[in-house]
């Protein structure tokens, strides 16, 4: 048997990681400014993370949600405190798409409605409902046809007002910052008006913070720059620093109905040990503040480069747009300068380094990046 060949992969195989660095089997060092799709938050192979997971594995790695699990309670309490949502409830699952799937279903259970509003260029995952609210028609299979979704222009509050005025939309789903859509930051005034309109029309507001959340923007959640409180927030990626774990944060007022949501693996002992270790390190090492400081520094320095069309983003979620396709530059950056970065579309670099990235590493990145843009 061979892996099902759906990925285009770089010809590099990491065998070791430390902080923001990755090493291949020949010992070549790479600077990781991508974090494996924004997943690495506290850095590769953090000693506290290794110790916590090893300890848990030596005790008990897994049991399902058929038993008590005080590690889930401990994690929910820590998450509530650090995120500013201690009055919300937490439902733990395993991936970003699964978190959004459950969020969309919970909204529909809650208000009995069937229709969903999403935004152009949105990405929310690959499961049934999550892929349906993702604005990439090529990802839809014929079986996805029957759920009704309207894709509205991003930042266009009049379009939202018009659509929600019929009082038939179950939920609006929006990314805290659009990631795969090109690092597009929603305007605070747009989010504030969106939140008000959702409340007025009985529509559930779901903010997908799977990529933009968990400290990456320089606040725990990107939407906190707008001062709104969504009804449901989804998290994944940085939450487990590579351990597959995700969550749905649910406002007071949603009724937990026994059996309505469920999962075998979600919130197991090992997943909770990972999530607890990550949040402990984030707090102890002030990684949210670090994301704000280093992110602002990087954005400021990148904006000085005349070759760049636009620099967008917040904290350590940065999009660098060029007038022309970046593939040749990206290849040089990877294979000659040994730097991992992401892309969106054809013209935008996407920087998503671990939140522990240092000023020295940021300067090293800038040095190598300037080299490839000035060729
Ligand atoms: C904003 C957003 N939502 C959802 C997902 C889906 O997450 P997963 O691949 O873990 O299902 C992603 C993944 O890139 C994402 O960026």
Image (cartoon, rainbow, N blue to C red):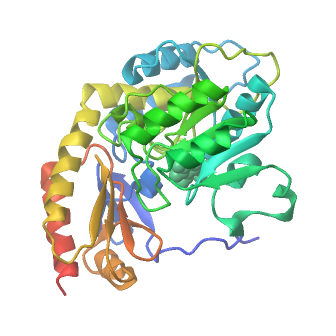
Say left or right for 293 vs 48.
left
The image position of residue 246, as x and y in percent, is 57, 36
The image position of residue 168, as x and y in percent, is 76, 35
Closer to the camera in the image, 91 or 1: 91
The image position of residue 122, as x and y in percent, is 56, 55
Closer to the camera in the image, 27 or 21: 21
Tell me if residue 127 can be seen: no
Q: Quadrant of residue 202?
A: top right
Q: Quadrant of residue 306?
A: bottom left
Q: Is 255 located above or below residue 332 in the figure?
A: above
Closer to the camera in the image, 169 or 140: 169
Say left or right for 237 vs 248.
left
Tell me if residue 64 can be seen: yes
Quadrant in which the N terminus appears: bottom right
Closer to the camera in the image, 195 or 70: 195
Q: Is 74 located above or below residue 197 in the figure?
A: above
Q: Is 53 located above or below residue 361 in the figure?
A: above
Residue placed at 55% from the left, 13% from the top?
A: 73
Say left or right for 363 vs 335.
left
Residue placed at 21% from the left, 79% from the top?
A: 373
Residue placed at 36% from the left, 68% from the top?
A: 349
């Amino acid at each position: 048997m061979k892996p099902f060949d759906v990925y285009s992969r770089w010809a590099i195989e990491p065998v070791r990681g430390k902080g923001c660095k990755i090493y291949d089997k020949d010992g070549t060092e790479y600077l990781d400014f991508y974090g494996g799709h924004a997943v690495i938050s506290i850095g590769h192979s953090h000693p506290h993370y290794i110790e916590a997971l090893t300890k848990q594995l030596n005790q008990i790695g897994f049991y399902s949600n058929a038993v008590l699990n005080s590690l889930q309670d401990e994690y929910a309490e820590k998450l509530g405190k650090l995120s500013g949502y201690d009055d919300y409830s937490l439902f733990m699952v395993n991936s970003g798409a699964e978190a959004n799937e459950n969020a969309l279903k919970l909204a529909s259970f809650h208000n009995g409605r069937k229709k969903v509003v999403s935004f152009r260029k949105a990405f929310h995952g690959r499961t049934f409902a999550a892929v349906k609210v993702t604005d990439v028609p090529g990802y839809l299979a014929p079986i996805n046809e029957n759920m009704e979704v309207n894709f509205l222009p991003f930042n266009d509050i009049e379009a939202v007002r018009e659509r929600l005025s019929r009082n038939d939309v179950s939920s609006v789903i929006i990314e805290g910052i659009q990631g795969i859509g090109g690092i597009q930051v929603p305007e605070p005034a747009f989010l504030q008006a969106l939140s008000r309109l959702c409340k007025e029309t009985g529509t559930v507001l779901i903010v997908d913070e799977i990529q933009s959340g968990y400290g990456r923007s320089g606040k725990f959640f990107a939407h906190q720059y707008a001062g709104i409180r969504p009804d449901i927030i989804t998290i994944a990626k940085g939450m487990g620093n590579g351990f597959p774990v995700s969550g749905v944060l649910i406002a007071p007022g949603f009724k937990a109905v026994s059996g309505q949501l469920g999962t075998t693996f979600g919130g197991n002992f090992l997943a909770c040990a990972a999530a607890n270790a990550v949040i402990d390190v984030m707090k102890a090492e002030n990684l949210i503040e670090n994301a704000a400081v280093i992110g602002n520094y990087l954005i400021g320095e990148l904006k000085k480069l005349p070759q760049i069309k636009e620099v967008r983003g917040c904290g350590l979620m940065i999009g660098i747009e060029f007038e022309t396709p970046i593939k040749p530059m990206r290849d040089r950056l990877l294979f000659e300068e040994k730097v991992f970065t992401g892309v969106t579309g054809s013209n935008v670099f996407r920087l998503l380094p671990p939140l522990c990235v240092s000023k020295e590493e940021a300067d090293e990145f800038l040095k190598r990046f300037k080299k490839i843009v000035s060729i």
